[in-house]
Amino acid sequence: MTETDAVTLHDYLRVVRRRKWVVVQAALLLPLAAIAFSLHQQRLYEASADVLLNSENLAATVPGTPLPGLSQEPERITQTQARVARAPEVVRGVLRRVSGTGLTVTDFLADSSVSSSPASDILNFAVTSSDPALTKQLANAYAQAYSAYRQQLYTGSIQSALADVERRLQELDRAGASLDGTGAASLGALTRYGSLYTSLVDRQQTLQSMQALQPSVASVLRQADGTVLTQPKTLRNGGLGLVVGLVLGLGLVFLWEALETRARTAEEVSARLGGLPLLGRLPKPPKRLRRAEKLVMLEEPASVRAEGFRMLRANLDFMMLDRDVRTIMVTSALQQEGKSTTVANLAVAFARAGKRVVLVDLDLRRPVLARFFDLEGPGLTQVALGNVPLEEALTQIVISDQPALRRRLALRRGGNGKGNLTRELLGLLEVLPSGPVPPDPGEFVSSPALVKIWRALRERADVVLVDAPAALNVGDAVALSSRVDGIVVVARPKILRRQTLAELNRLLAMVRTPVLGFVATGEVEGEGGSYAAGVASHGYQSRAFDAVGASSGGPARTSYS
């Protein structure tokens, strides 16, 4: 996926699949941590009771009588009463009703709450405690203490109004007694005195009636009859942990992807190399073969790993079908991507298919092909200097599945391999090692002597495979690209940086030689290779019995593997 490509849902799913274990671990660990935390929490219970607020308006009943609070809006009344219920005097009333709790006013306020609803005249009193029986008892006591406190406030208002009326009546009585003594009051004054006195007496009677009736301004509507476990909420915490774990896992995955600088898949390598076709996926060779510097195609020709090289050979055959491609340079962006191992195994795979194959080591910075085939002797640089003929520097490698045949051929050193042995041979290739490393490899790969060697090899073989240096380390690969018919790039997806691939893509765009495709190395076995696994399980093996006849040129020296 290039920087300008649109991101699709498939791309997101591929990212999640690639790092699915991050999501799985987060989705498992967070719920387990939430459940473990819940199991260590103290068990708390909650009980609640409801109190109904009666809308008795003493001021409307008795004009001129003051009442606590100025607002008559229902919503503000309930909110005000919810604040009144949190008064310390109310809490002290609760603690007096339920003795032995050991709670202070502050403790009780922290473990309780009073809530009001704008659509009703009901207050809800809730208490939380670790003892379910005590919780229910405290909730009921809280509702009762508030009701008593509210009733006390209401009764106190009536008594205060009644005391005020009685005081004013006493003042009128004293004023009337003084008028009777002097006899100087006018008729109008006596009339006003009589009407005021009558009004005060009426109010006194009304207040006395209200005091006798004692209307309830707050009553317990519902008592707490049970408790609810509020802590721990194990299932809820586990569910929340699962949701948070999934979200966190996905967030980490996409953050990792955003910060990742490596190309993770062969498909991404292909996209970043301008849509270069994928020719094959090759797993990493076994450790024992890597330590011994042996080739899979020679040591384990019937294995699934070897089948990957056969599939690579078949794909290259299709790529060369309508093209005049006989010399192929194999390179990579950097070292340690499996370039030399790939080209050596590919050469054996072509030879087993009956092709006349020449394998040339032109990685003069780090030549390794001679070690794969246990070769000693002259090489390419000595041929270029004219010290050794080309035929003497070429070493013939006989491909056979029978170790006994290899031993017989070893006894007949220098033979041409004809006769009855031809029917037992699978193929034959010629290897041209690098020889002594020149002081300036960059100048050597551009020398005219190398052009003559190239022409001779092209006429000698069906396929010439060249192991070239890493393209981004030195300029040898660019210089060699003009001498070959096609280029194959070896790339290890989980090692290469995206910036490195961008530089390699720029370099490949500059060369005129067609790039046939790339090979993904270091792939997990079975990834993109289910076909190879199925073929190997049925014992399929590619064989070609005419390889010797096609390549019998009578080399001066022969090595057997």
Image (cartoon, rainbow, N blue to C red):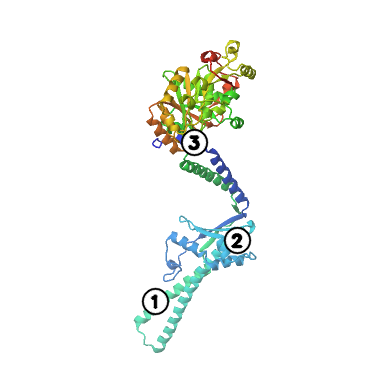
Per the image, the residue denoted by label 1 is 195
Classed neighbour count for the residue bearing mark 1: other residues with Cα under 10 Å, few (<14), some (14–19), many (≥20)? few
Residue 220 seen from this side: yes
SS class, disc 3: loop
Within 10 angstroms of label 2, few (less than 14), some, or many (20 or more) residues? many
Give the foreground label among 2 and 1: 2
Among numbered discs 2 and 3, the one appearing first in the sequence: 2
Q: Are marks 2 and 3 in contact (CB under 8 Å)?
A: no
- The residue nearer to you, when weighing 36 against 553, is 553
> Do the numbered discs 2 and 1 sit on residues whose CB atoms are within 8 Å?
no
User: What distance separates the C-alpha of mark 3 from that of mark 1?
Assistant: 103 Å
Find the distance from the CA under tag 2 to the CA under tag 3. Answer: 63 Å
Query: Mark 2 falls on what kind of element?
Result: helix
Q: Quadrant of residue 174?
A: bottom left
Indicate the amino acid at tag 3.
Answer: Arg
The numbered mark at residue 264 is: 3
Residue 218 percent coordinates (x, y) = 52, 62
- For discs 2 and 3, the disc positioned in front in the rendered view: 3
Relative to 76, residue 33 above or below = above
Q: What is the quadrant of the N terminus in the image?
A: top left
Q: What is the x, y in percent for residue 283? A: 55, 30
* Residue underneath mark 2: 138
Identify which residue, 9 or 428, lies in the foreground. Answer: 428
Percent coordinates x, y for residue 368 in the rendering: 53, 30
